[in-house]
Image: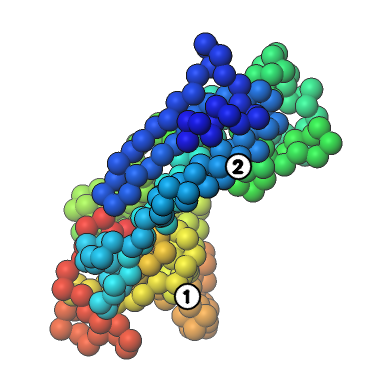
Amino acid sequence: MEDAIVTSQYVYVDDDHLVAVLVDDEAYYRTIRGKAYVADLRDEFAFESDVTRRTLAAFAERGIETPTVPPRLGENAFHAGRDSDRVESPRAMTDDAAAAEAYFESLADPTRIRILAVLARADAAGETPLPYSDLQSRVGVRDNGRLNYHLSRLDGRFLARDDGEYALRPSGRFAHLVAVRCCRDADRSPVETDADCHACGGRLVARRDDGAFVVACSECERTAARAATPFVTPSEVGRAAFLDALDRTIRERAGFLSRGLCPWCRSPTALSADADGRFCHRCASCSGVHRTTPGELLVDHPEVVAFHRRHGVDVGERRVWTSRSWRARRRPSAPAIRGASPSPSPSTGAT
């Protein structure tokens, strides 16, 4: 690989700009990565393609083959309520790891985060696409070469460029949300809800717990609802608006699971019943495991909504944690749901 790098027509090498080749030994394969500078930032992707193509050709000439699936199964197999021998090949895992590394390396700089933030604010104000000069002044980078370098790391994946003007792609908006909101230190103070615990009568509060929000009793700590953290905080929108956002987030998760879809990656899930009466939803695509009660899956069902409406109740006006049925669980002796097999015990790390 080093020969392919130093002989590339796009590379720039001197005493201050050296070439590095990194080798990582894994269980069944070896990962080789090269790092170097290009003479022109516009040739960065051409440089990567040139080095990769010639390195693979050199490997093929010397009989170095791409790793294949190891002849063992077991700990990597995914079990979704039935035996399975699904296992990813080392090459697939390497490709995923390389793609993830490239994604996060593109964001690993404060200047690039500022670029995303500036374009997000401009988009909210209806000012995008933003001309290069306006973007440069708002980001606060005077050196054109430095700004061009950071734009090149974001361009295509996170940014859309047309005739010297820039705007965020949908992936750029999501990256901005993750970088600015999910990664910041958030207020962990509990937020008092408008409901009491059905078990002991204590007040239900919403609090952060391992990256999620849990609605639980302040007295007996019984959990009433759980969901991923909304992208808003009580200090930004107020207590009532925050609780509304949390309610919608919980309903959205339950809606995906009731349709047999993973709320994380939108892939189909396999359904089984736990011994404690909850349903277990397993996703083979992202390895997500989600658990629900029957009440969670039925709260927005059309027949349930119609039944309540005939009795003068609009379930949409009530937050989900106020309902007893939301937390209802079947007794362990109750018959299993049709099409689901009971699992002996819930696994760790479930939502």
Q: Horizontal and vertical percent for residue 200?
A: 20, 59
- Amino acid, disc 2: Ser
Q: Is 258 left, or right, of 188 in this rendering?
A: right
Disc sitting over residue 82 in the figure? none
Residue positioned 57% across, 24% down in the render: 37
User: Can residue 71 be seen by looking at this rendering?
Assistant: yes
- Amino acid, disc 1: Arg
Residue positioned 34% across, 76% down in the render: 271
Residue positioned 69% across, 25% down in the render: 40
Q: Horizontal and vertical percent for residue 18?
A: 50, 19
Question: In the displayed structure, would residue 268 be above or below residue 62?
Answer: below
User: Can residue 112 be seen by looking at this rendering?
Assistant: no
Disc sitting over residue 49 in the figure? 2
Nearest the eye: 227 or 81: 81
Q: Is 147 left, or right, of 106 in this rendering?
A: right
Q: Residues within 10 Å of mark 2 (few under 14, many from 20)?
A: few
Of discs 2 and 1, which sits in the foreground? 2
Q: Horizontal and vertical percent for residue 220?
A: 19, 53
Nearest the eye: 285 or 282: 285
Q: How many marks?
A: 2
Q: Earlier in the sequence, mark 2 or mark 1?
A: 2
Estimate the spatial distance between the alpha carbons at disc 2 and disc 1, rounded to whole Å. Answer: 42 Å
The image quarter containing residue 268 is: bottom left
- The residue carrying mark 1 is 259
